[in-house]
Amino acid sequence: MNKLFKYNIVTLIELVESKPCLWNKTADCFKDKIEKQKAWKEVYTFLEEDFPQKEKKEQQKIGETITGKWQNIRDSFVKSLKKKSGQAAKKKYLYHDNLTFLLKVVQSDDTESSTDDSQNEQHSQINEPQDEDEVEVEIEVQAQRNVAAKLKDLKRGGKQQKNLDYKKKSIKEF
């Protein structure tokens, strides 16, 4: 538990999960400010038992602390789902298993590692019989992707450009 955040984070996550209006962008109640305020107040009251008896300023401070922590947790989870191309595999986010309910609404642009891609391709080749035409088309498509990627990376001419032109010509003839 964070020293500055005195509440149980897993409990906070479970409370938010139980209130779709706080996280489910597709739910009708998500756009209802009054319902969201009511739901947050229930979360605050659960985490801070004497919340209703506190002064307004103290309630506001507690509310900002809890909602801020939730936003940080949610944003960190979303960030952990996004990987940059070529990035090595990394550990799962600490609360990943608790936050899987957010996968329904998170728009992520996941980039799988190259080892995952090759394993998926091998797996699909083992499980799905492909005829020779499909294999040839797939090889040609992959070769074109490789050439396109190299073209993008190469911004200078010379021997490398001539080599690349030769490879492109070879692929087209293939």
Image (tube, rainbow, N blue to C red):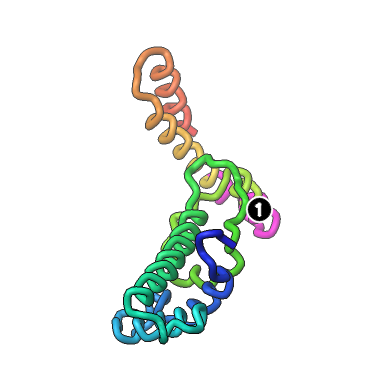
In magenta stretch: residue 114 = no
Tell me the SS state at disc 1. Answer: helix
**109 lies left or right of 14:** left
Is 125 placed left or right of 22 in the picture? right
Is 158 located above or below residue 22 in the figure?
A: above
Q: Give x and y (percent) for residue 103.
A: 50, 68
Where's residue 121, x and y in %? 62, 50
The residue where tag 1 is placed is 125
Q: Position of residue 152 (x, y in %)?
A: 38, 32
Residue extending furthest top? 159
| Residue 3, placed above or below residue 38 | above
Q: Is residue 5 above or below residue 146?
A: below
Give the camera-side residue of 42 and 156: 42
Residues 100 and 174: in front is 100
Please give left or right for residue 55 compared with residue 100 in the image: left
Residue 129 showing in the rendered view = yes
Q: Which residues are magenta?
A: 121-136
Q: Is residue 148 above or below residue 16?
A: above
State the residue at coordinates (35%, 17%): 157
User: Residue 87 is drawn in which quadrant?
Assistant: top right
Residue 133 in view, yes or no: no
Q: Main secondary structure of the magenta part?
A: helix
Q: Is residue 131 magenta?
A: yes
